[in-house]
Amino acid sequence: MLFTKCIHPQILGALGKLGHGSWILISDGGYPHITHTPQTAEKVYLNLAQGILSVSQILETLKETVPIEEASVMTPPDGAHLPVHEDFRRIIPDVKFNFIPQFDFYKTAKADNVGLVIASGDMRNYANLLLKVGYIPNGQ
């Protein structure tokens, strides 16, 4: 039995293969998963229906499963910060956030260090989040 809330075998397997500095993409329901993610990334499709599951729900579980060092969010081309971004910051308040315009975000999310892609059913615009896997200080 696991102590973590996350019990999804494919996600747990992928997380076990990631290390410090690897990235996880949690994407909204409209994200181009085939063309804007690396082919080598493990892809998990949790987008059963509109709104199920949301990026925020997935983030709530992942924050208790893996150390998060840094986060990057997709912004509209004008760089505006949106309510969805504040929702993410509320969930992981002690994590540094980067705000990346849409087309630059696509390039960043396609990098080889993105090892896990989780597709959500989130229908909020720009609800795309990259998480940098951190480390556990002093082996705690």
Image: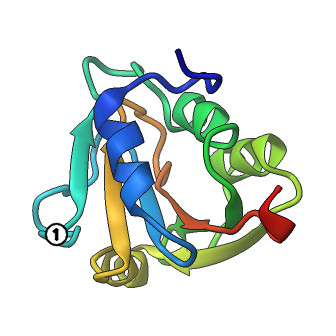
Residue drawn 43% across and 51% down?
15
Residue drawn 66% across and 68% down?
134
Q: Position of residue 6 (x, y in %)?
A: 52, 27
Side of 50 relative to 56 (left or right) = left
Relative to 38, say whether 136 is above or below. Answer: above
Q: Position of residue 128 (x, y in %)?
A: 46, 55
Q: Which residue has dot 1 on it?
A: 40
Q: Position of residue 56 (x, y in %)?
A: 60, 35
In the picture, the quarter occupied by the C terminus is bottom right
Residue drawn 27% across and 17% down?
49
Q: Which amino acid type is shown beneath numbered disc 1?
A: Thr
Side of 93 relative to 62 (left or right) = right
Q: In the depicted view, which residue is nearer to us: 108 or 67? A: 67
Q: Position of residue 18 (x, y in %)?
A: 43, 64
Q: In the depicted view, which residue is nearer to us: 8 or 118? A: 8
Q: Is residue 9 visible?
A: yes
Q: Is residue 26 visible?
A: no
Q: In the depicted view, which residue is nearer to us: 109 or 40? A: 40
